[in-house]
Image: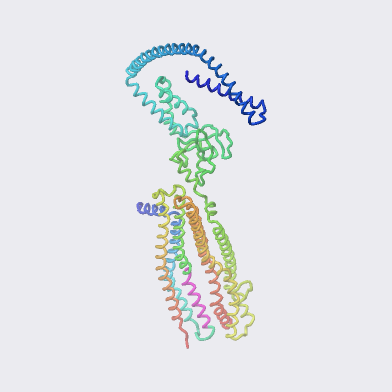
């Protein structure tokens, strides 16, 4: 376990400060994703049952008022299920951008070393190149993982909101 | 003999020439015939003089011969003296080599010892010249140089005291490279003023003064570095300088004061501000856009938080419309026209919502545009930086990476600035947009429902 964290710290050290930013972003992103999955698995069913019960409990489901109230209930629940989804989407989009930031700061490091040593020492430049390439890779991996999770969560949210709309039947 | 004759002849000739010229000048020639006459007369008188001179020379000849004899006698005497001296020199030469051999025999293994002493003194001298301890103990190098000069002359031998002093200096140098000590020394400030200061020496690695400034030692004098390393290093230095004991962390440059390449690299590393300036005009433009975006986002967030709070309190109290929030203003349409039929009410409500939406969404498009434009501006800076680099290549050639590095770092800094503006702006846009959308959802999809629920409740009661 200690060896594992040492390897991880060594990796973070090679990648530079931007890698910590990517790690923080990834942490927030997956926390939000897990929160959504948690809600969809546990909270959502209860909310749907509540809404359906409230709708079925109405004395009439035909009038203009009834229709408007139905719309309102659907909208409120949809807001519930769609919460945080735009933030997750943005965080996924930010991952490659942060990777690019790491690339450029790494390249600045390389050119700094070049300016000091005159460019003759390839070994000392390799550190900067590592700082440039590792965050790019990390950003890509983070974005890829986020893309799949985000697609999964978004699709379920869409399906469930359609399912809710179908369940609130109107009398004719 | 012949030289003397030539000299005399030359003198005579010049005499003749001046005489004839003088006579011509003295008597103005009236015609060519007269001139011819003068020349003839002159020749006659010259011939007469020449004969007189010849007589004089022949009389001198006897004297010259006597002088020559004397000179030859002198030469013979000198030659004899030289031969005598040469013989003596050879004798002495033999004597010297005999004595030297005697000396060699008597020195024996000592020669080897003195050779080692010379080379050890030479090594120590070159070490001491660059050693930081020399700032504390000046004059050590002079002693060693004198000793080396003395030994290489090979006619004098070092004294026991001198040999012992070399050993002492060697031991002192070894000891001094391992201690942290304070002493007073003259330090020149970056402005060039020299003043005594209390300084702290860390072995043979670094010297700092009690204010925590790193000093450099060069050519026998201490001077404050014109630019101090930034970050924690300065703090460490002053902590150590003022510490009375215990453990202190301190930035030591293991390459020493003369190598000092780590310290130099740290000093050469541009500060954040210098880096920012490397971005040039494009960098400043990106910064301005970024600050604008940040202020705009914060302002919109504050406004939307306030509006959201008011909408929430309105949601709890639907029966009385409050015009200080968008939801209240939409509800007021219904409140003002309680007897309206449903279709007109719906139209009126959607009109009210349409009026409120732009106020809530204002600034969001601008934020989105800035988030998209900032990386593009960074790209612009990259390209202008590359143009500068290629201009540098055209002028200086590609041989000097330092000439190119400036343009390249400028190019990269603008990219960094572009991304640094874009990333938070995208995040802020999402957050602000989320708040705005929530309120718009409430207005757009839920107002009619709330009104319906409210009227229903009123009917029931």
- Residue A99 falls in which quadrant of the image? bottom left
Q: Give residue B298's position: percent from left, percent from top.
A: 57, 63
Residue sticking out furthest to the front: B33
Q: Main secondary structure of the magenta part?
A: helix
Q: Give residue B372's position: percent from left, percent from top.
A: 51, 66
Rendering colour mode: rainbow
The part of the chain drawn in magenta is: A66-84
Q: Residue at x 53, y 15 (%)?
A: B55
Q: Give residue A167's position: percent from left, percent from top.
A: 44, 80
Return the residue nearer the eye: B95 or A66: B95
Q: Give residue A139's position: percent from left, percent from top.
A: 42, 61
- Residue B51 falls in which quadrant of the image? top right
- The number of callouts visible is 0
Work out whether A67 lies above or below A124: below
Return the residue nearer the eye: A66 or B95: B95
Q: Residue at x 64, y 24 (%)?
A: B23
Residue sticking out furthest to the bottom: A172
* Magenta span contains residue B30: no
- Residue B100 falls in which quadrant of the image? top left
Return the residue nearer the eye: B435 or B130: B130
* Magenta span contains residue A82: yes
Work out whether B376 lies above or below B166: below
């Amino acid at each position: 376990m200690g060896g594992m964290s040492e390897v991880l710290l060594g990796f973070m050290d090679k990648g530079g400060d931007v890698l910590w930013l990517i790690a923080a972003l990834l942490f927030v992103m997956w926390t939000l994703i897990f929160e959504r999955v948690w809600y969809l698995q546990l909270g959502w069913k209860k909310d749907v049952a509540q809404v359906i019960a409230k709708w079925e409990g109405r004395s009439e489901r035909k009038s203009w008022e009834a229709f408007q109230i139905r719309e309102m209930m659907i909208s409120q629940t949809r807001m519930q299920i769609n919460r945080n989804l735009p933030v997750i989407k943005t965080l996924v989009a930010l991952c490659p951008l942060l990777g690019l930031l790491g690339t450029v700061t790494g390249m600045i490091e390389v050119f700094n070393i070049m300016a000091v040593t005159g460019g003759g020492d390839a070994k000392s430049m390799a550190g900067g190149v590592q700082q440039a390439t590792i965050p790019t890779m990390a950003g890509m991996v983070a974005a890829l993982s986020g893309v799949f999770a985000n697609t999964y969560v978004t699709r379920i949210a869409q399906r469930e909101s359609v399912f809710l709309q179908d369940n609130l039947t109107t009398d004719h | 003999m012949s030289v003397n004759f030539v000299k005399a002849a030359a003198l005579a000739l010049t005499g003749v020439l001046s005489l004839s010229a003088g006579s011509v000048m003295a008597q103005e020639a009236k015609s060519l015939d007269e001139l011819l006459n003068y020349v003839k007369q002159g020749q006659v008188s010259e011939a007469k003089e020449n004969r007189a001179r010849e007589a004089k020379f022949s009389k001198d000849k006897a004297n010259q011969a006597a002088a020559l004899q004397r000179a030859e006698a002198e030469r013979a005497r000198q030659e004899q003296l030289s031969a005598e001296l040469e013989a003596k020199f050879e004798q002495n030469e033999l004597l010297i080599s005999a004595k030297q051999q005697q000396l060699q025999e008597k020195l024996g293994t000592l020669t080897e010892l003195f050779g080692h002493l010379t080379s050890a003194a030479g090594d120590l001298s070159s070490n001491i010249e660059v050693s930081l301890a020399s700032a504390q103990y000046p004059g050590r190098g002079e002693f060693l140089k004198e000793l080396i000069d003395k030994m290489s002359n090979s006619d004098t031998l070092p004294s026991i005291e001198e040999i012992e002093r070399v050993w002492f200096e060697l031991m002192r140098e070894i000891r001094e490279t391992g201690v942290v000590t304070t002493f007073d020394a003259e330090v020149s400030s970056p402005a060039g003023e020299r003043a005594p200061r209390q300084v702290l020496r860390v072995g043979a690695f670094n010297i700092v003064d009690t204010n925590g400034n790193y000093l450099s030692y060069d050519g026998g004098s201490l001077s404050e570095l014109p630019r101090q390393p930034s970050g924690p290093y300065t703090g460490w230095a002053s902590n150590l300088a003022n510490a009375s004991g215990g453990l202190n962390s301190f930035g030591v440059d293991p390459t020493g004061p003369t190598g000092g390449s780590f310290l130099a690299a740290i000093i050469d590393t541009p500060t954040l501000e210098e880096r920012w300036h490397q971005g040039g005009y494009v960098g400043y433009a990106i910064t301005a856009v970024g600050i604008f975006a940040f202020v705009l986002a914060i302002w919109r967030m504050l406004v939307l938080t306030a509006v959201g709070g008011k909408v929430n309190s309105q949601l709890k109290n639907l029966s009385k419309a409050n015009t200080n929030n968008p939801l209240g203003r939409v509800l007021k349409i219904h409140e003002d026209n309680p007897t309206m039929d449903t279709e007109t009410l719906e139209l009126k409500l959607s009109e009210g919502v349409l009026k409120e939406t732009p106020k809530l969404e204002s600034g969001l498009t601008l934020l989105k545009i800035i988030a998209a434009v900032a990386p593009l501006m960074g790209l612009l800076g990259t390209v202008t930086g590359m143009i500068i680099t290629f201009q540098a290549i055209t002028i200086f050639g590609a041989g000097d990476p330092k000439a190119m590095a400036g343009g390249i770092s400028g190019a990269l800094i603008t990219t960094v600035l572009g991304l640094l503006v874009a990333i938070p702006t995208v995040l802020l846009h999402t957050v602000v947009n989320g708040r705005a959308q929530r309120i718009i959802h409430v207005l757009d999809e839920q107002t009619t429902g709330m009104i319906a629920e409210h009227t229903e409740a009123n009917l029931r009661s």
